[in-house]
Image: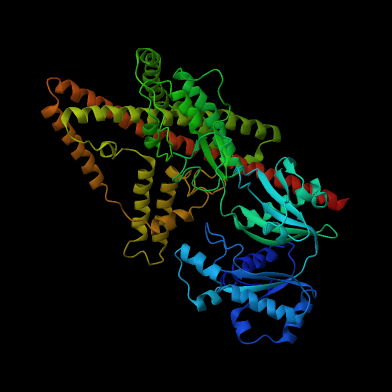
Amino acid sequence: MMFLSDKLDQRQRDSLGKKAGNLVELMSANTVIPDGFILRYEDFSKGLVEAKLLESIKRIGGFPVAVRSSGQLEDLGDMSFAGLYETFLYIDSVEALVESIKKCFDSSQGNRVREYLAKADIEKSESELYEQFSVLVQKMVDPECAGVAFSVNPLDGIEDHMLLEVCEGVGEHLVSGEVTPNQYIYHYQKNEIIDQRIENEKARLSGEELKEIANELLNIQAHFGCPQDIEWALDSQRKLWILQARPITTIEWRKDLGELTNADLKDGGISSAVCTPLMFSLYRKGMNESMPGYFKKLTLLPKEHPEQWLFACYGRAYWSAGEVKKMLKSIPGYNEKSFDEDLGIMKDYGSQGPDSTGLNPFSLLRAIPVLMGMEKEFKKCHEENSNFESFFGPLEENYHKLMNRGLSTLSEKDFQDELIFIIKILFLQTETSYYRTIYNNSNLQSMFKEFIEKIEKRVGDKINTIQLLSNLDGVAHLEIQKDLAKVSAILHESDSKDDTKDYKERLDQAVAVFLKKHFHHGDRELDITVERWGEIPQRVVEMAQDYRELDQSKVIDSYQREYQRVKELILSNGGFFSGALLKKFEKKLAFVRSYLMLREKMREYSTRSYYIVRQFILELDRRWEVREMLSFFILMKL
């Protein structure tokens, strides 16, 4: 027998089943939960001693109690075992308690559970079902009203909206469908009711009660790290009690923001994990500035266009693919499916299929300024960003001098002025220039693939575009690998185990050389809260210990082989103008490859700008902390 208030490790909590295990965890996090104890099947099978049960009941506050089932299979992934196990309320005697506990354990072997497991293709023996099951006995809350609350509205997927359903009395009336509950849709950030349906005035919640439930629900969601469905109750004193917490098993994808995607933002990018509000605000500023500016250059931006292009949904960032597609539809030959495939967007187009724009005299006339604008933009962006060091370098040098002197030496006004300049000029211009390169690179690659498809038809053979665009020189992450190899070489010398002064000096020197070039990089560069390697030099040693050299010769060979193969195909099968076609192929290939290298170069500038922003944000945090401490000491003196 275990009590909810016991200090249990994760393994012990998991063995109690979802319901009991979650409540033990929440009680340890100071959530207000009715006290209780948990019985395993081994406790029950050995024979329950009534005296021990009565002692346990007294410890949690006496009768009446609630007896609830708790299985490890409950709410497994996208499955819910709700309604398959037994629950008994207002148990007021030891005899009724023993009988209720027995019925709960019996329910773990019930036909409904067996049928549900069979449908889910899960096999469990009788002993396994008993072992993965426990019974929770809690002090009964006698509620004036009770209900359920969802931290994300599962009906429309809007995460700022919470869905709450309330009934008079115990919540089991609501769960079983015996009553029609009051329903609230509550915007927790604005602390206001978006919509409500009142069926019973006795179950009406005040604004403060809604706010209290919402705050508790947010804390529980933060604790477990995923959207939560909770059961709660308000007693006769209107005190809030949490009765149960579990993950929401099904949430509708929100449709109020149009078609969103995280393409090009995942796989190590800003959407690879939950994004902090600070990081999202920086990224959104860059995209909101760069996206309309780019489409304006292509003469595609309509007068009425959105101000926001990046959205935070479910803790991650998504950009508006729907708005981009609206503009691209005006280009003849536009094909939504090809656009999606190039970006890795998976979409169900339904019975109407993907959008496309046909070719006709009018649409072709519309395409001329777009294509001319695109070609002009490709060249102009390449030229300007190839010389980006002339803008970035002097500013970066100046800020490194400031940081070396110590940002704490700046006056309040000077510090604020520098921070504003960094965000509005250094960071924003760097980031918008980087995004501009990304947009151009994406369009350029799409046009190059179309060109390659034409060559394929001419020569009658397939061409591997991926291999043609591999083995790029000077890419930052490859440079990191090369320089890390030098640190690794010292670590793995035959005499490296000797703790000599010479060895330590050579290792320190190698780390210093590495950091001189790569100090601004880190394990998660698109999370400004994560330390950079320049701040934690020991991390370089850890990476070097795990370093495994990659064989780049195969990549180089595959590129050279494919280039030579395509060259021979064109010369032998390209027809009368094969020489001109080869020259055009080589020119386009060289330009596309140079754009890929430019994109990586601009990514490096972006990373360097984030490093500077991070250092100033850390100083800002330190200054705020000093102010709080000063305020505290002043209050103490008062």
Given residues 453 and 274, the one toward you in this image is 453
Q: Quadrant of the N terminus?
A: bottom right
The image shows residue 507 at horizontal and vertical percentages of 40, 56
Q: Is residue 559 visible?
A: yes
> Residue at left 15%, top 22%?
579
Q: Is residue 595 above or below residue 576?
A: below
Q: Is residue 551 above or below residue 391?
A: below
Q: What colouring method underlies this structural image?
A: rainbow
Dividing the picture into quadrants, the one containing residue 442 is top left
The image shows residue 206 at horizontal and vertical percentages of 81, 47
Given residues 354 and 609, the one toward you in this image is 354
Describe residue 585's horizontal placement relative to residue 222 as left or right.
Answer: left
The image shows residue 226 at horizontal and vertical percentages of 59, 53
> Residue at left 53%, top 74%?
129
Q: Is residue 426 visible?
A: no
Given residues 62 and 475, the one toward you in this image is 62
Describe residue 520's horizontal placement relative to residue 588 as left or right.
Answer: right
